Structure formats: C-alpha cells, structure tokens
Amino acid sequence: MLAGIALGTWIGAVLLPSGSSAQATVWLGVALAIYAGLGLIKVQFSVPPHAELWLGLVVGIATGAITVATAVFALPAVPYIQALKFERDRLVQALGLSFTVSTVTLALALYHAGEMHMALAWPSLVALGTALLGMRLGQMVRGRVREETFRLWFFLGLLALGLHLALRGVL
C-alpha cells in the first residue's frame, strides 16, 4: 500500500489537471460522510489475507491520486487499514506510516511542480508542531477513553468534516 501511495501520488501529479479543486473537495466530503455513516452504523469491512498485496497496491494508488487532488490522506487508505483488523496500537501505527508516506510524497510532488517555496517554511513548521502536539495528546486520550467512545467521536467528527467539505464546495 505504501508503494502504491508513492506511485499514485506521482500519477496524480502528472495526470490530474491543476487549478480549482472545488469539485474534488465536494466528492471527498461526500465520501467521508458516507464512510462515517457506515462507521456509525457499524458496518465493518475485512480484507482476506490472500487479497492484501494486490488490494493494498490498488488502495495505495487511489490514495495517492486523491491526496494530490485534495491534500487529504484519508481515503481509501483509512478504511482499508481498518479492514485489516489490527489491534488499536498497531492500527494507529499503520495509519501514522500511511500519513507519513502520503505527506512526504505529496511534498515531493509539490516541490517537483514548483509549488514549494521558502514562504511556506514557517507555516509548514507551525503546522508540523501542531500536528506533533495533537499526536501526543491523542496518545494520552487513546489510553484513557473506551474504544467504543473513541470510535463514536471519531466517526461523528469525520461526518462533520465530510458534510462541511461537501457543503462548502456546493454553497
């Protein structure tokens, strides 16, 4: 899947048209809202072990292309990783690796396209610091919150984000 993310990011950077991402944002919002709805009603997917290799590659390629279009790393990587049925700490580790590879490959694609400038260094460092602080707080909360409560709030937050993105692009 991680190799697929790198490949999909490259494909997306080369093939996707540049310009307005409003339509991609609407579709991303719709997809996030649907995924959150499925999570709230507890629909669970699973990936058979014999399909992990090829499906991981396909999911990675799609995630990379979607990342280039929207700068959001969640779909379809997050549902795929959840479908692998990792225990909570391994799930968080797998998600972290996926987000890291997505971030690095997107940064390389933006650099190659000439979109990375020194003017972005300070805001990027602030965002990185905020993300690291959020990860640390998340680790503290994850150890203190029941898994079912965490799951409920995760999907409610994802639903709110999806609806916001979809409606912002439409209105």
Image: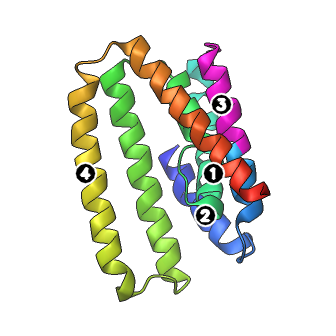
- Residue assigned mark 1: 61
**Marks 3 and 1, how far apart at CA:** 19 Å
Q: Which residues are magenta?
A: 30-47
- Residue assigned mark 3: 35
Q: Position of residue 75 (x, y in %)?
A: 61, 43
Q: Quadrant of residue 136?
A: top left
Query: Closer to us: mark 3 or mark 2?
Result: 3
Using the image as rendered, state which of residue 159 and residue 27 is in the foreground.
159
- Residue assigned mark 4: 132
- Which residue does the image show at 41% across and 15% down from the upper left? 149
Q: Is residue 154 above or below residue 13?
A: above
- Residue assigned mark 2: 68
Q: Position of residue 2 (x, y in %)?
A: 48, 47
**Marks 3 and 2, how far apart at CA:** 20 Å
Q: Is residue 85 above or below residue 63?
A: above
Element at badge 4? helix
> Of all residues shown, which one is farthest toward the front?
171
Query: Closer to us: mark 3 or mark 1?
Result: 3
Using the image as rendered, state which of residue 105 and residue 124 is in the foreground.
124
Relative to 60, 17 lies left or right: right
Using the image as rendered, state which of residue 47 and residue 113 is in the foreground.
113
- Main SS of residues in magenta: helix
**What amino acid is at disc 1?**
Ile
**Marks 4 and 3, how far apart at CA:** 26 Å
- Which residue does the image show at 59% across and 55% down from the upper left? 64
**Marks 1 and 2, how far apart at CA:** 11 Å
| Label 1 environment density (alpha carbons within 10 Å; few <14, some 14–19, many ≥20) | many
Query: Closer to us: mark 1 or mark 2?
Result: 2
Q: Is residue 75 visible?
A: no
Q: Earlier in the sequence, mark 1 or mark 4?
A: 1
